[in-house]
Image (cartoon, rainbow, N blue to C red):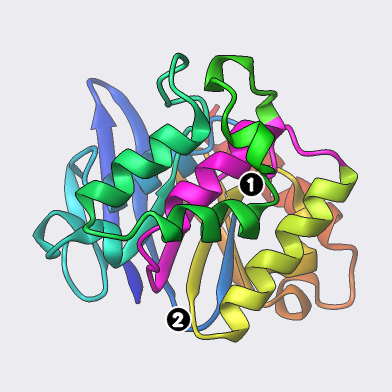
Amino acid sequence: MIEFDHVSKLYKDVKALDDVSFTVEAGSITGFLGPNGAGKSTAMRILVGLSRPTSGSATVLGRPYTELGCPGSQVGVLLDAGAQHPGRTGREILTLSAMLLGLPKSRVCEVLDMVGLAARESRRTVGGYSLGMRQRLGVAHALLGRPKVLVLDEPANGLDPQGIQWMRGLLRNLADSGHTVLLSSHLLHEVERVADRIVMIGRGRVLAQGTVDELGQGRDLEQTFLELTANANRSAA
């Protein structure tokens, strides 16, 4: 459903991504794990056509994102929860997108209910939202077109413990019903509790990938991740 094939990205003399390859299978959650600055957001921007790779390719549903017909109905994307007009209400933002996708207004109510934004909250302007509320609105926006694939960059940022638990349940239910999820985070414990597979990235390179059990090999996964990241930093130095 998602494939990165030897993707590299250079910004002048800085290599943001270095030969990144991995796949995300249908009906699964893949956690894209790495510290801030590891290259996660760059990879996701390339995947959804907001940036071009220097070499290699990234495809979703077997094609580049920009070649999909009506991509909003096939791939739900959340890259920046703050990238919404602060003077519009959450309901207005979703309604405008629903109109562009040819969806009925009833779909707006459905996704608001899915993400737990009450009617009163949806009628407030986004400029007055907390970060957690913006994350919920961003997830609602990603789900609007009933996509089979979700690409979510740090969706748990700003959520309280109850909100994080809700997010885990939502993503698990979506995957179990056949959706495919690529989820980036720097929060190891949250990723390992929900992901079927994990791709660890550091300094723009894939350090390891596999299931939690495969990566841990009987050891504490956090320690494995810290060691891999430290080795990548030493190699870059």
The residue segment tinted magenta is 132-160
Indicate the quadrant where residue 202 lies. Answer: top right
Question: Quadrant of the image for the N terminus?
Answer: bottom left
Question: Quadrant of the image for the C terminus?
Answer: top right
- Residue 234 shows in the view: no
Q: Residues within 10 Å of mark 1 (few under 14, many from 20)?
A: many
Q: Secondary structure at mark 2?
A: loop
Q: Amino acid at mark 2?
A: Glu
- Vertical side of 134 occupied by 183: above or below: below
Name the residue beneath numbered marker 1. Answer: 185
**Residue found at x 34% / y 33%:** 15
Give how far across and how far down residue 92 sits, in percent. 41, 33
Name the residue beneath numbered marker 2. Answer: 25
**Residue found at x 52% / y 54%:** 109
Give how far across and how far down residue 35 sits, in percent. 64, 37
Q: Secondary structure at mark 1?
A: strand
Residue 181 in the figure: left or right of residue 104: right
Q: Are marks 1 and 2 in contact (CB under 8 Å)?
A: no
- Residue 26 shows in the view: yes
Q: Amino acid at mark 1?
A: Ser
Residue 175 located within the stretch drawn in magenta: no
Instruction: Judge by depth and name the residue closer to the eye, 26 or 200.
Output: 26
**Residue found at x 85% / y 53%:** 223
Residue 84 in the figure: left or right of residue 127: left
